[in-house]
Amino acid sequence: MNDPKELEKNFYEILNVSKEASFTDIKKSYKTLLLKYHPDINKDNDSSEHFIRITKAYSVLKDDLSRAEYDESLSTSIKSSNQTKFQYSYHDFFKIKDDIFNVFKIFFKNISGKKLPSIRKDDYFFWDGEIDEGVLKMSAKELEERLLYSDNLFVKINAAIALGIKEEKSLCGVLENMLSDPSDDVKKAVIWALGNLKMKKNVSMLKILYENSPIGVKIEILRSIYKIEEGKSTVFYKLLTEAVNGSNMDLKKEALKLLLKIDNKILYDDVKEIFKNGSGEIKVLLDRIIAENKIINYPGRT
Amino acid sequence: MGRVIGIDLGTTNSAAAYLERGQAVIIPNSRGNRITPSIVGFSKKNEALVGEAAKNQAIINSEKTVIGIKRKMGEDFSILISGKEYSPQMISGFILRKIKEDSEKYFGDKVTDAVITVPAYFTDSQRQATVDAGKIAGLNVLRIINEPTAAALAYGLNIEKNQKVLVYDLGGGTFDVSILELDGGVFEVISTRGNNHLGGMDFDDELKKLIIKQFKSETGIDLAEDKLALQKINEEVEKAKFVLSELLEVEINIPFISADNTGPKHLEFNITRAEFELLIESYINETIELSKLALADAKINIDELDRIIMVGGSTRIPLVIKKIEEFTRKKVFRGINPDEVVAMGAAIQSGIISGEVSGVVLVDITPLSLGTEVEGGEFIPIIKRNTTIPTSETKIFTTTVDNQEEVEIHILQGERKIAGENISLGNFILTGIRKAKSGVPRIEVTFDIDVNSIVHVSAKDLDTGAVHKIEVSSKIGFTEAEIDVLIKESEKFKKDDELKIKFLDSKNEVKALILKIEKIAKERSVKDKFNEEIDEVILRTNQAIDEKNLEELNKNIKILNDFYEELSLSRKTEKSNSLVN
């Protein structure tokens, strides 16, 4: 495969220079040969072998010391090792990084810092957290992203509430989907927000959810349906009376509270009816709620 | 053969270029951008999204989004997404396929071949992995070339004068420094140094760590546990880093990044350029140290350097420029966009190989010593680093015990004396050695490093003449057969995706159409034959959707469209009639 004549050539012959050639001459010839024999340019099968011989010869002759050694080996006809003798110790310079955190301070603060009492929880708002202007200024899309994808329950809850405050009707569908969230707290916030959207189509969905929900969620559903229907539907009334006559005290109280707010004629009469003919327990409850909430106008007031 | 392109497959961004009348030209992607984010995401339906599309959905789909895969190339690593394992080669393959397809759209012509760039300090396994990624993307990888060398090509084509050049390449994930000599069309690399895990991503991480730490001390909330918050921080940190290259201070505001039982929490963070520089200074110092070593390897004095070429997005950082200018006592040389210069160099290299560019040749070196492990766990280098490639060395091995019939050769890359501290490329076992006293058999092992810096090993028993040829590909590599399967899979994947997307488009279109028709139909006062006809077509359409029959679906869309037009017209006349009445 190799031309025997080629193999017998010494480094000077390979590089096409005389033994007396200066480094500059050697280098010049070397570069010319590179351009001629590099496998990128020379597509002959043996160009690679040829190229390797050239680079090896040059790696020895380019250095004064290894060239002198080679010259000596040539004169004594001993085959030379063509390896260069240079070797550098490996410096392990990867320093351990300083604890840069101690060097300077950076501060965080609330963006607006302002609290907005006007939009702070209404009577039915179960949540203690405070939502500020910074959050309300955010786009529906940003809030949606947080509601859907955050790992943090508090983020989800606040996002739902913010959407409710902003009455983002366009995201009604997203909120509806979130009713299946595994967390009851998130569910409550979503129900609250849906109440704020005041879209009638959500009533039947909330009613279905009501059936199998824990008390806390049920209370939130009653409040939301109240907001949507403003107390004017028979569905709502049915749920309330069921709750009033049910066994859970919290739900009972809530239902009564809502009943007291109803201004609808028919329901008004029903509340009156409770005052007149309801069980003693319910009457006591009603009185307490009226007193606690300082309600002045209520149906059945005598 | 179709078109040939040059590809800079970067850690954070990739770019492509081609040669037009001897000039390298950047190929914009399908969105018209000159760089494409090296990000791959998988949708719910397991469709691969690449580039901007993947970046845009990263925030809501972080679990199925892969960023910075280049840092894992050549490692025994896989990512599990929706029950399917993806190797770094496969993920990079998605990026390369996207670049290939975008280029094909741009040319209106097939792209078959590519020159792909890698960091100069990439090992054999990392290069092999890059070749495999190209193959998976359906590309014939014409050549793997080093990024700094490619950059020098792009900068140096028109230079007459002999020059010594330092290329400082600090990208998103890797750092390389190369010393080159440009002389009469020969671009000769003299020395190279680098760190495959040092880059802009590290600067982002430092900034992120600081933000998270401070937020925790302020609010008690650990954002490191919150994927959505982390994604938001990632985005802002990258932007802030860019701003700090221009301005002396930056403010990061992320409203409502978290919340606790007291309500939503906002993040506001100020950092000055000086503070940022403190964060990253140790990294920059490391690059300067490596540059010093590269110069020492090249046996060149700082004053002999003619030019300092800056490559990679991170070289926009003022501290980087300041440090390198202090060190070299020279102004750095800029001119070509540091994000694009590497791809342009790759395009020029494709021209050198094809013969379109003449009188120019790139002569590169191997960045790492190649050798074997010998008795006692010592590493014996056989090809020293900074050796010009292609190259070849031969060594005679023998047995260590009497009647030994097998010799195991462990091949490694690196500079450490202890074999275990270097990078293992693989083992191969030479069998069928003639039984003899220890030290008698002579086995000649040839180590070749080809022009792509990829290692090949072959062995020959000098007594029996038995020849073994071994392609060094470590356990993480793919066999040709495996690659074939992956290519077919990725092609099928693409075809299926196209059909699926078309079907979804049609489905959405028809659903909207049906809604509109039903609305108008309901308004119509008369229930007539026309209404029945419509109902029937709608029924057929829904059937086609259930059966996923795209052809039938499209046929019905046409009919429904006609109905809709007719209905809209009749509605208009009805309305105008009622006005008259």
Image: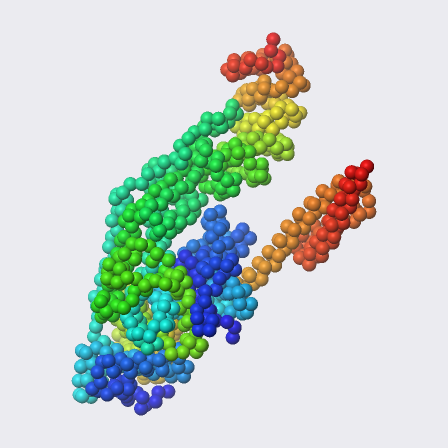
Most extreme residue toward the bottom is: A5
Residue B522 visible to an observer of this rendering: yes
Question: In the picture, which quadrant includes the C terminus of chain B?
Answer: top right
Residue B345: where, in percent of width, then height?
40, 68
Kindly identify the residue that appears in the image at 37 percent across and 43 percent down.
B251
Q: Is residue B401 left or right of residue B570?
A: left
Quick one: B190 or B45, which is closer to the camera? B190
Residue B224, placed above or below residue A49: above
Where B497 sits versus B270, above or below?
below
Quadrant of residue B457 in the image? Answer: bottom left
Q: Residue furthest top?
A: A302
State the image quarter where residue A295 is shown: top right
**Which residue occupies 53% across, 67% down?**
B107
Name the residue at 37% across, 76% down. Answer: B360
In the image, B415: left or right of B553?
left
Q: Position of residue A237 (x, y in %)?
A: 64, 23
Q: Nearer the viewer, residue A270 or B515?
A: B515
User: Which residue does the image show at 39% across and 39% down from the upper left?
Assistant: B267
Residue A238 visible, this orientation: no
- Here the colouring is rainbow
Question: How many marks overall?
Answer: 0
* Residue B374: x %, y % from top left: 26, 70
* Depth order, front residue of A295/A205: A295
Q: Is residue B563 above or below residue B496?
A: above
- Counting from the top left corner in percent of width and height, residue B74 is at 39, 63
